[in-house]
Amino acid sequence: MQTVEHIFEKNQTPKPLVLAINAVLEASKEIAFLLQKGAMSGILGSAEQENVQGETQKKLDVISNDLLKDILKACPVVAGIASEEEDLPVPANKDGEFLVIFDPLDGSSNIDINVTVGTIFSILPSNGNDASQESTYLQSGREQLAAGYVLYGPSTLLVMTTGQGVDVFTLDPETQEFVLTESQSTITPTTQEFAINMSNQRFWAESIQNYVGDLLQGEEGKLGKRYNMRWVAAMVAEVHRIINRGGIFMYPWDSREPAKPGKLRLMYEGNPMSMLVEQAGGLSSNGKIAIMDVVPEHIHQRVPVILGSKQEVETALKY
Ligand code: F6P
Ligand code: MN
């Protein structure tokens, strides 16, 4: 049995980076515990509601954010953090080496229906720059030192890369350790499964209309094979399915908010997922270039996403 600590040793992951990742994992175990308690923890429902005792309830995504923030701020190697739930970057330790960027609870509309959610994280070097400044964080995905997610489903899983492939760990509920359960995951290059929110079809650009139109044509269409569709409505779960059995996931630009380039955020959704997908042999693009080559201008910047099985993403990009 190999724990995540054994894999850090095997990969010779630098000690300070291990400390930063472990801080994320410590918070994720607490989040997993709260999720398992569910309604009994009194934290379901929307923020700023009152529970029966008249106490103010906070939404679990706010609580998850606070847990991560507190643990990371107390970790001396962390220079600063940025989160989906924080408008501005939060500086942590002056001598810290790392910036930790995260989506504390991706797919949080799934919590109340007891369906999979996850914590997504990305670790960048601080390069000695001021971690209270947004500009310090605006590095492309290629600069990531580590990326991963913790998936809270029937099991709690950690899927992570430090640039040496993708490993999958399962949280042992008895020992509270992440145990290696799949080493060096790879994404199958071909697939017959796609994931996109079809209800937005009328708002998509023509190219996506044409590609998804051909997927729906099945064996009678240009692509000559029948496709199946899946939509969990949590990016973390779609990416996990793709890492397991291949597929293509898309959240393209659409005309609902034409000024915004899609729904998903580059720095804590697009980049970490792209690093995992590329490390597992898949492809990830914004439709023009690799997502990890996008130079960010804002922490909360959005990005169109097309990722998954290499050959299928290449087919989509031809459109
Ligand atoms: O964080 C955004 C997110 O929840 C993703 O996890 C998910 O892929 C997407 O939004 C779902 O969006 P929609 O509302 O279109 O189903
Ligand atoms: Mn999210």
Image (cartoon, helix red, strand yellow):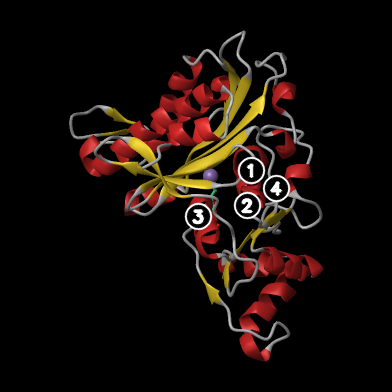
Residue 306 placement (x, y as % from top left) = 68, 58
Question: How far across and down, in percent of the image, does residue 160 sit?
Answer: 53, 42
Cα–Cα gap, marks 4 and 3: 19 Å
Q: Which residue reaches farthest top? A: 94
Quarter of the figure that contains the N terminus: top left
The disc, 1 or 2, on the residue closer to the chain's N-terminal end is: 1
Three-letter amino acid code at the position of disc 1: Arg
Which numbered disc covers residue 240? 3
The reply to whether the C-beta atoms of the residues labelled 1 and 3 are less than 8 Å apart is: no
Q: CA distance from mark 1 to mark 2?
A: 16 Å
Residue drawn 19% across the image and 34% down it: 52
Q: Is residue 39 above or below residue 202?
A: above
Q: Could you classify mark 1 by the number of other residues whose Cα lies within 10 Å: few (under 14), some (14-19), or many (20 or more)?
A: many
Q: Is 166 located above or below residue 125 in the figure?
A: below
User: CB of mark 3 within 8 Å of CB of mark 2?
Assistant: no
Give, as a three-letter code, the residue at label 4.
Val
Q: Residue 251 is drawn in which quadrant?
A: bottom right
Looking at the picture, tell me which residue is in the foreground, 9 or 160. 9
- Among numbered discs 1 and 3, the one appearing first in the sequence: 3
Residue 125, horizontal then vertical, whole percent: 68, 24
> Element type at marker 3?
helix
Are dots 4 and 2 in contact, CB under 8 Å? Answer: no
Query: Mark 4 near ligand 1 (CB under 8 Å)?
Result: no
> In the shown orientation, is residue 68 left or right of residue 134?
left
- Amino acid under disc 2: Val
**Mark 3 residue crowding within 10 angstroms, few (<14) / some (14–19) / many (20+):** some
> Which residue does the numbered mark 2 point to in the structure image?
277
Q: Nearer the viewer, mark 4 or mark 2?
A: 2
What mark, if any, has residue 303 been given in the picture?
A: 4
Q: Are marks 1 and 2 in contact (CB under 8 Å)?
A: no
Which residue, given by chain and number where applicable, does mark 1 sit on?
A: 265
Is ligand 2 closer than 8 angstroms to the Cβ of mark 1?
yes
